[in-house]
Image (spheres, helix red, strand yellow):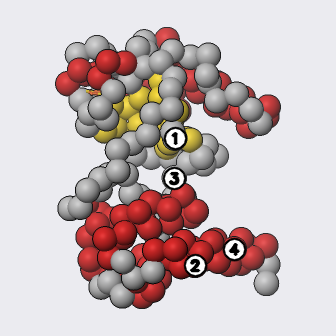
Amino acid sequence: MDLKDNEIKKKFNKLDEILAIYGKDHEQLIRVLQKAQDVFGYLPEEVQAYISHKMGIPVSAVNGVVTFYSLFSTEPKGKYNVNVCLGTACYVQGAQKIYEGFKEQLGIKDGDTTEDMLFTVRSSRCIGACGLAPVLTVNEDVHGKLSTKDVAKLISRYKKNETAGEDNGKDLPGVGDYQEPTPTGP
Ligand code: FES
């Protein structure tokens, strides 16, 4: 077994632990999928099929939930998921320019991931933090009251993490412990 196989096996072991907690409680499917995505970084077909089998839920139903919610991804994502809110409050405060700035400076298109697998950039509707508009999240960090000048600062801050192994850009504006609200059923 090579390193990659070992890595995958460990992830499925972790998934087994999660599934053992939630059993066949169908109402917990979204929570299980969230946790599975935390482990794998995304939800490929084989992970969906595994969850379907273990929870006794048709794979079409699992896939339906995965494709319904924008927080789930079926493609590998970068280490840092930049999610720029383009809801009304953020849009009128210039969020579109910030979004374009990220894509331009990273050389990627909507929803793409950089070749080094560091950044995935996408947009979302209102994330419920309008008071911080324009706002974006990078994984669980929230950055608000941004300007286009902050784009380069944020990119370099997260890139620096790779060498320093610390500091999640907490000196940038509007950082908090925001958590995306847990969705409640399709
Ligand atoms: S519109 Fe961006 S957080 Fe509400």
Q: Which of 130 and 67 is in front in this view?
A: 130
The type of residue carrying mark 2 is: Asp
The vertical placement of 76 against 89, above or below, is below
The vertical placement of 101 against 139, above or below, is above
Q: Which of marks 2 and 4 is in front?
A: 2
| The label number, if any, that marks residue 16 in the structure image | 2
Mark sitting earlier along the chain (2/3): 2
In the image: residue 150, left or right of residue 74: right
Instruction: Please tell me which residue is depicted at 36% across the width and 88% down the height of the picture.
Output: 56
Q: Which of marks 1 and 3 is in front?
A: 1
Q: Which of 66 and 186 is in front in this view?
A: 186
- Give the structural element (helix, strand or loop) at label 2: helix
Discs 1, 4 touching: Cβ within 8 Å:
no
Q: How far apart are marks 2 and 1 (CA)?
A: 24 Å
Discs 1, 3 touching: Cβ within 8 Å:
no
Residue denoted by label 3: 77
The type of residue carrying mark 4 is: Lys
The type of residue carrying mark 1 is: Asn
Residue denoted by label 4: 10
Q: Quadrant of residue 163?
A: top right
- Give the structural element (helix, strand or loop) at label 4: helix
Screen quadrant of the C terminus: bottom left
Residue denoted by label 1: 139
In the image: residue 171, left or right of residue 173: right
Image quadrant of ligand 1?
Answer: top left
Q: Quadrant of residue 111?
A: top left
Q: Where is residue 143 in the image (x, y as percent from the top left)?
A: 47, 24
Q: How far apart are marks 2 and 3 (CA)?
A: 22 Å
Q: Nearer the viewer, mark 3 or mark 4?
A: 4
